[in-house]
Image (tube, rainbow, N blue to C red):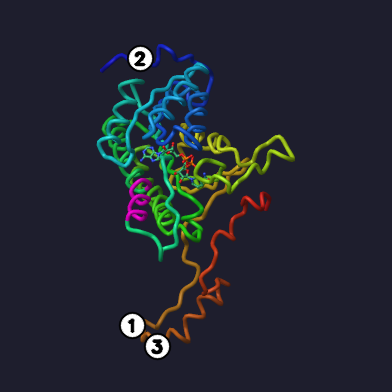
Amino acid sequence: MRQPVSQARYIPRMGLLDGKVAIVTGAGRGIGRGEALELAAQGAGVVVGEVDADAGQAVVDEITAAGGAAVVQVGDCAEVEAAEAIVARAVDEFGRLDALVNNAGILRDRTLAKMTPEEWDAVIRVHLRGHYAPTHAAVNHWRAAGQPGHVVCTASTSGVLGNFGQANYGAAKAGIAAFAQIVAQENWKHGITVNAICPAARTRMTEGAYGSIGSADDDFDFWHPDNVAPFVTFLCSDAAAHISGKVFGVQGDTVELYRPWTSEAVIENGGNRWDPAVFADRVGNLFEETGINPAAENGMARLRYSMTNRTP
Ligand SMILES: NC(=O)c1ccc[n+]([C@@H]2O[C@H](COP(=O)([O-])OP(=O)(O)OC[C@H]3O[C@@H](n4cnc5c(N)ncnc54)[C@H](O)[C@@H]3O)[C@@H](O)[C@H]2O)c1
């Protein structure tokens, strides 16, 4: 194994992740950049995964200028070879891997009726395959090494609540929440945790949507992308080793816990197969019992924190 070159530049400090090593995909800007900076500030050596080499290198320069340790690994995280290469890079450069933050993502917003197959495929690929490939490589690395590890996946309220105009993105993000829950179960006994966050922040991706809310009337900028990083850093640490398969909302100074899809009511037919015509009379019980509206709804209306309503 090569001598870890970056450790020569690495200034040890008392942090939550001293001596640990983390990968962040899509860390060249936005939420991923903040995560890479915080992980490094907490003592981790960081591999900045990016398709945009300049953006990735700029984050590495910021980290190293501040006395941290980081390297950029250029590649598409949805490519299996690139995902394996980023795990290998962590081990080559820093001698180990402790955490993986799957953050890279793109948008191609369009209502379904107007959505092209290319817009569907691009979003599903970057998010779902972009979670599968690095997680597959990291989990197999940890299992082969008999070592614990922590994975943080990036879902979205657009998936777990459902946002108009984002059938591709929301399907991918809800899929990521399910992915985290399932991979968590499969790897719990190996000491590997897998959680998902639903962040919200002002980035290139949400340009315009979040304006400068929070900066005008107080010092805390609620929608600053760096606000997401502290909780992600905690999930990457051994202090969170008892938490797995969970989905958290992370925005501003708030952390929310989502309850997974849960069955709320049931109708039964006395041990007999249903006659479809009977549902016209019976299905209403499900909605009456739960108060759930049978019509299509705006799931995002259930957001506790939104850009137009920061407080509960
Ligand atoms: N910004 C929000 O409010 C918000 C809300 C919910 C979820 N998210 C999710 O958070 C994550 C980060 O979003 P952001 O707002 O910081 O976006 P961003 O566009 O600012 O940054 C995303 C970064 O990922 C990189 N990237 C894209 N595809 C990649 C690939 N295939 N391989 C490697 N890198 C790639 C881009 O070059 C970019 O630097 C995404 O998964 C996004 O879906 C963001």
Give the mark nearer the N terminus: 1 vs 2. Answer: 2
Write down the residue under mark 2.
5
User: What residue occupies the far top of the structure in this picture?
Assistant: 8
Q: CA distance from mark 1 to mark 3?
A: 12 Å
Q: Is residue 289 above or below residue 22?
A: below
- Return the residue nearer the eye: 106 or 77: 106
Spatial CA span between label 3 and label 2: 70 Å
The residue that appears at 50% across and 58% down in the rendered structure is: 163
In the picture shown, does residue 196 fall above or below 118?
above
Span colored in magenta: 118-127
Characterize the local packing of mark 2: few (<14), some (14-19) or many (20 or more) Cα atoms within 10 angstroms.
Answer: some
Q: Where residue 158 sits: x, y (%)?
A: 49, 55
- Estimate the x, y position of residue 114 in percent, counting from the top left: 40, 63
Q: Which residue is mark 1?
A: 273
**Label 3 residue near ligand 1, CB within 8 Å:** no
Q: Amino acid at mark 3?
A: Ala
Residue identified by numbered label 3: 277
- Judged left or right of residue 219, residue 72 is left
Regarding mark 3 in the picture, which secondary structure is present there? helix
* Magenta highlight on residue 122: yes
Is residue 8 found inside the magenta-colored segment of the image?
A: no
**Mark 2 residue element:** helix
User: In the image, residue 67 lies at what x, y percent?
Assistant: 50, 16
For this orientation, the residue located farthest to the right is: 217
* Residue type indicated by callout 2: Val
Callout 1: 10 Å neighbours few (<14), some, many (20+)? few
Q: Is residue 155 left or right of residue 81?
A: right
